[in-house]
Image: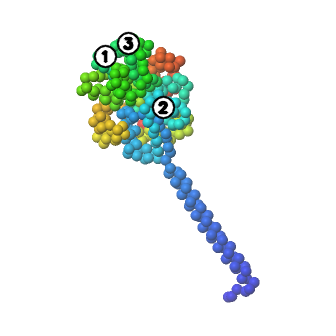
C-alpha cells in the first residue's frame, strides 16, 4: 500500500528519529568502550615507590628482584637513588622526596629518638665483616688509635662501629681525632697517607687490603665483633605505611622472590649483583661472606624480645646507649617504636 501524502512527513520524522537514536547509541557505546579502556589502562599502571639507597653487597636480593622484573610481577615500579653519603638518606626520607630507604638499624634508632616517624618493615640481614676499621699494619689494636686521626663518616653505621669499638676498649671519641671522610673516599685518603686509620665497608675494605700484596693494611676491628648491631633494614615513613600498605607488601614479596632465586641460582645471582655494583663476579663471591642475609624463616626473630643483639630489642638497647653517650640523642626510643611487623607476618603466610 502506498503512503498517503499526509503520512509522508510522519514517516520521514520517524526515520530521522530512529537514525539519530542509532547514532546516539553508537556514540554512547564508543564512549563506554573508551572509558573502560582508559580505566583498564589506569588500573594496569604499576604503583611507584621511590627508594633512597646506597651500593652495598647486602642488598643482593633487591638487585636480583629488580633485574628479573619481580617488582613488575607484583605491579610495582621501584625507582632508586644511590647516595654515596649515607648520612644524607634520613633527611631525604623525612623531606618526603622518597617513600622509603635502605638504612642500618642504628640510623633508625637515632632518627626515631629525634621524633622522626619511620619504621623498619623488613630486616634484611647484618654485616659480619662487611664493615670494618682498617689501619696500617703498625697499628695492631683499637687502643693504638689514641691520639691518631681516624677517617669516618659521621652519623652513619661507620660512625657507630667506631664508637662501639672505642667503648669496648674503654675509650671515647675524645681519645681520637676524627676526620670526616665518606666510606668511598677512605681508600684514596689512606693511600695518600692521611689518615692511617679509616672506617669503611665493602668493596672499599677489599681495595685497601689488596694494596702492596696485602702487606700495607689490615682489619683491626669489624662488624664480626658486633654481630647483629649493624643490621640492614628497609624503612618507610609512617605516612606511607598507613596509606600504601599494598605497595609495601608488593615490595616485600618481590624481595622474598629475589632471596629465593639467590638460593637456587647462586652463580646467576652473583653476575646480577656484580653488574649492579659494577664489580667483578669474583669480588661478589669474596664479599658475600662479609654479610649475613636473613632467610625468611629467621626474620621474625628480629622482632622477638631478647637481649641478643640479633633482636631489635637487644640491639636497640646497645645502640641507644652509645648514641646517648655520644650526645647524638637525649634518650633511646622503645624498640616497638622503631618497627612494624605486619609485612613480615603477611610474607610468612604467603
**Residue lying farthest to the bottom in this orientation:** 1
Q: CA distance from mark 1 to mark 3?
A: 11 Å
SS for callout 2: helix
Q: How many marks?
A: 3
Residue linked to disc 1? 139
Which label lies toward us, 2 or 3? 3
Q: CA distance from mark 2 to mark 1?
A: 33 Å
Residue linked to disc 2? 89
SS for callout 3: loop
Task: Residue at 41% x, 23% y: name it.
Answer: 152
Toward the viewer: 11 or 239?
Answer: 239
Residue linked to disc 3? 146
Mark closest to the chain's N terminus, 2 or 1: 2
Instruction: Quarter of the image for the C terminus: give it.
Output: top left
Colour logic: rainbow
Q: Quadrant of residue 181 in the image?
A: top left
Task: Residue at 34% x, 20% y: name it.
Answer: 196
Amino acid at each position: 500500500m502506498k503512503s498517503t501524502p499526509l503520512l509522508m512527513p510522519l514517516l520521514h520524522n520517524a526515520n530521522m528519529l530512529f537514525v539519530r537514536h542509532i547514532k546516539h547509541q553508537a556514540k554512547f557505546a564508543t564512549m563506554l568502550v573508551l572509558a573502560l579502556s582508559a580505566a583498564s589502562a589506569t588500573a594496569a599502571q604499576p604503583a611507584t615507590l621511590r627508594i633512597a639507597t646506597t651500593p652495598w653487597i647486602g642488598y643482593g636480593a633487591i638487585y636480583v628482584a629488580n633485574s628479573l622484573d619481580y617488582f613488575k610481577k607484583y605491579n610495582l615500579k621501584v625507582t632508586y637513588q644511590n647516595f654515596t653519603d649515607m648520612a644524607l638518606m634520613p633527611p631525604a626520607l623525612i623531606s618526603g622526596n622518597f617513600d622509603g630507604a635502605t638504612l642500618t638499624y642504628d640510623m633508625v634508632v637515632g632518627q626515631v629518638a629525634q621524633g622522626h616517624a619511620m619504621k623498619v618493615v623488613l630486616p634484611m640481614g647484618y654485616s659480619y665483616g662487611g664493615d670494618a676499621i682498617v689501619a696500617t699494619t703498625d697499628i695492631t689494636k683499637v687502643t693504638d688509635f689514641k691520639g691518631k686521626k681516624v677517617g669516618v663518616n659521621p652519623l652513619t653505621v661507620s660512625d657507630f662501629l667506631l664508637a662501639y669499638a672505642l667503648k669496648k676498649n674503654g675509650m671515647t671519641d675524645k681519645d681520637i681525632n676524627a676526620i670526616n671522610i665518606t666510606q668511598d673516599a677512605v681508600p684514596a685518603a689512606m693511600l695518600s697517607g692521611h689518615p692511617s686509620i679509616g672506617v669503611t665497608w665493602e668493596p672499599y675494605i677489599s681495595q685497601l687490603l689488596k694494596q702492596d700484596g696485602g702487606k700495607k693494611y689490615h682489619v683491626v676491628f669489624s662488624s664480626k665483633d658486633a654481630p647483629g648491631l649493624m643490621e640492614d633494614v628497609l624503612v618507610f615513613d609512617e605516612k606511607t605505611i598507613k596509606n600504601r600498605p599494598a605497595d609495601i607488601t608488593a615490595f616485600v614479596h618481590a624481595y622474598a622472590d629475589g632471596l629465593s632465586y639467590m638460593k637456587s641460582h647462586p652463580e646467576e645471582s652473583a653476575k646480577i649483583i656484580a653488574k649492579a655494583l659494577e664489580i667483578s663476579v669474583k669480588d661478589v663471591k669474596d664479599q658475600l661472606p662479609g654479610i649475613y642475609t636473613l632467610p625468611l624463616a629467621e626474620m621474625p626473630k628480629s622482632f622477638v624480645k631478647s637481649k641478643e643483639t640479633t633482636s631489635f630489642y637487644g640491639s636497640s638497647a646497645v645502640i641507644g646507649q652509645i648514641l646517648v653517650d655520644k650526645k647524638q640523642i637525649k634518650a633511646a626510643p622503645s624498640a616497638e617504636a622503631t618497627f612494624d611487623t605486619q609485612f613480615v607476618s603477611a610474607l610468612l603466610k604467603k
